[in-house]
Amino acid sequence: LSASAMKQLRALGVELRLGVHAENLTEQGLEVNGEFIACRVKVWAAGNTASALGKTLGVPLDRPGRVVVNEDLTIPDHPEVQVIGDLAHFEHQKGKLLPGVSPVAMQQGRHAARNILAMIDGRKPLRFWYWDKGSMATIGRNKAVADLNFVHISGFPAWLAWLFIHIIFLVGFRNRVAVLMQWAWAYFTFNKGARLITRNFQAELRPPA
């Protein structure tokens, strides 16, 4: 799927540079492995750190600041506290760290609620097990990749799957219809919908009178 994603990105005119590091960033551009690339817009997408709340707990943290939790989502030596979502460092499932994405957080939230009710009734909390339903990513118009565990698809079929799965998981029939109509309008009219203007670049480029 990674090869398909790179192929689709290149078809959109994206130049990919893998295995390199940005060394300097200025208003005029950025320097990558000794080469200066002039550009005005820079998008930094190199991950994030966990909430600062984790540092106040006085418990073991990983490098991004996530709380290392037990297999039942509790903190070591603190069974009364459960940590979920992208604040939790959970690697009790096949030795792999669970990603900080919404499906993981949603399942952990439901599991934590059941564990809290169990502890109120005097029962022990159960271990958490994440049901991985797969992952999807849209790359552009009619372009996407999808790993559905049992099948890997890319291109237009993956884009359609991404579209309908996202609509299905919306809450309420009215929301589904509204989003479907908005997406259909944007698709057939090529209307991006969102605009963000922070500076008058045309005025800056206009020669002085």
Image (cartoon, rainbow, N blue to C red):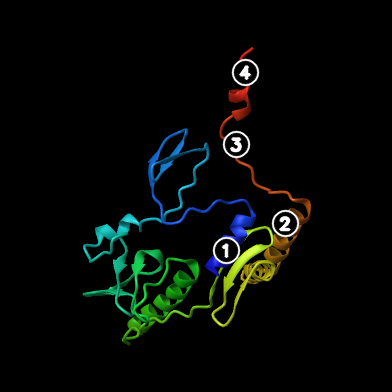
Q: Which residue is mark 4?
A: 207
Q: Answer whether labels 4 and 3 touch (C-beta < 8 Å).
A: no
- Compute the Cα span from label 3 to label 1: 29 Å
Residue 6: percent from the left, percent from the top? 56, 61
- Quarter of the image for residue 109 reads bottom left
Report helix, strand or loop for mark 1. helix
Q: Does residue 146 appear left or right of residue 124 in this picture?
A: right
Judge by depth and name the residue closer to the eye, 14 or 209.
Answer: 14
Q: Does residue 137 appear left or right of residue 105 in this picture?
A: right
CA neighbours of label 3 inside 10 A, class few (<14), some (14 to 19), many (20+):
few
Q: Residue at horizontal 42%, vertical 76%?
A: 113
Q: Which residue is mark 3?
A: 197
Q: Residue at horizontal 32%, vertical 59%?
A: 64
Instruction: Say the numbered circle drawn on residue 182.
Output: 2
Judge by depth and name the residue closer to the eye, 181 or 132.
Answer: 132
Q: Given the image, on which type of amino acid does mark 4 rest?
A: Pro
Instruction: Say the numbered circle drawn on residue 47.
Output: none
- Compute the Cα span from label 4 to label 3: 21 Å
